[in-house]
Image (cartoon, rainbow, N blue to C red):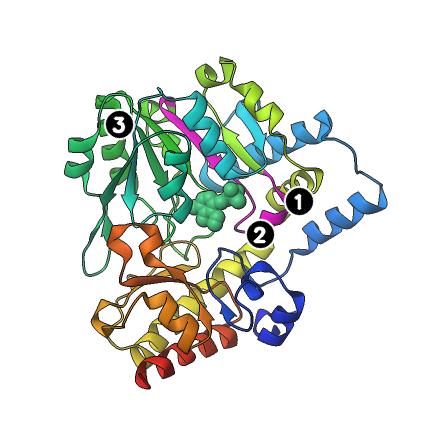
Amino acid sequence: MRFDDITAEQLFALGGSKWSRFGDAYGAFVAEMDFGLAEPIRAALHKMVDDGLSGYISPVWDQKLREATTAFVERRYGWTVDPGNVLASPDVLTGLMVTMEHHIKPDARVILPTPAYMPFMFLPGKANHDLVQVPMIRTENEWLLDFDAIDEVFQDGDLFILCNPHNPIGKVYTRDEMQRLSEIVDKHHGRVFNDEIHAPLTMPGVEFVPYPMVNEVAAGHTLTAMSASKAWNLAGYKCAQLVLNDEDLSHSHKFAFDLHGTATPGMLSNIAAFNEGEEWLAGVNDYLAANQQRLIELLAEELPGAVFVPNQGTYLAWLDLEALELEGKPSDFFLEKARVALTDGGACGDIGKHSVRLNFGTPRPVMEEMVRRMGEAVRSR
Ligand SMILES: Cc1ncc(COP(=O)(O)O)c(C=O)c1O
């Protein structure tokens, strides 16, 4: 099916979380795409059911997942990883919790550039680590890390959360930026939790470099989390991968991942995505790039004054709506007046209170309707 032909009515009828949590509101919040499954993944899952594979995770599939993951990152980024350094986890956030529990000192703080993915704002507190927000700098056409501020707040042994591509701003970090970051982290004997869950989703012509590839130092202080869950829309099947260095692997906390095992559908669908899903992915990346172009036009027509720095990766658009002078939280305004459910920018850090995050991983006509509704709501205030 062509993605354009998928309708909002069909999406409501399917009843996924994005299309049911707010009743009849159009779903543009949670990071899910509306494009169905890639054929090789569908086939792998059907085969799993037909074969009656319903027991605990098998070491055979575990090994296949490690190999599929490392072959994928080698092919796509030229990143060589030993399959033995890959651990399966049910999801990326479990990887973060285990990192905070086992891989940093109890008094280490978590340094977070904002705007940030919402759970990064509250999970450190739940793991008894203080959070330090470091607002990013927005220029006319890009977002930048505030390296001086990061260097200033960093204390010995702190954990830096790097999200690349960066949810919610869609930034893909350059080699130079990551090189500079690695020097600061190293100077303070810190660690990096490197979240690359959105990595396969890049705009045409954008080069993605995994942070551990930047230099040996970066590789040494980093735990990398990834998954096929965003690029192939598999989050509900529960499977992510953690890449650890030898030293981290040798510690007892490997046990923590063994306990929090992943699920068979997650493993099998991730294996199929990494081994056979790149053709579908290329189509999705092209479609998202065209959606982003259309979004830029629509914003100019429907929401003049909205500021959007175009994404280099993923499908989450960060819209600064301060100039629109909306009353209350922008996300509440649009939920009520436009029946469009967006992510509240304030949940992404203090810097985001006038912003919303809009998910454009949806059929173009559906996205067009969302932005038109938003424009209409603003005009009829
Ligand atoms: C940057 C980022 N990290 C982590 C997650 C959560 O991933 P998981 O469901 O694997 O914990 C998301 C989900 O949207 C995300 O966007």
The amino acid sitting under disc 2 is: Trp
The residue that label 1 is drawn on is 269
Residue at figure coordinates x 38%, y 47% from the top left: 207
The residue that label 2 is drawn on is 232
Marks 1 and 3, how far apart at CA:
35 Å
Q: Quadrant of residue 120?
A: top left
Q: Earlier in the sequence, mark 3 or mark 2?
A: 3
Asked if one can make out residue 371 in the rendered structure from this viewpoint, the answer is no
The amino acid sitting under disc 3 is: Val
Marks 1 and 2, how far apart at CA:
9 Å
**Considering the numbered disc 2 on the image, is that residue within a helix, a strand or a loop?**
loop
Q: Give the left or right position of residue 216, taking residue 54 as reference.
A: left
**Where is 271 relative to 215, above or below?**
below
The residue that label 3 is drawn on is 185
Quarter of the picture containing the N terminus is bottom right
**Where is 350 relative to 100, above or below?**
below
Specify start and end residues of the magenta stretch as a single range: 220-239
Marks 3 and 2, how far apart at CA:
32 Å
User: Extreme bottom residue here?
Assistant: 380
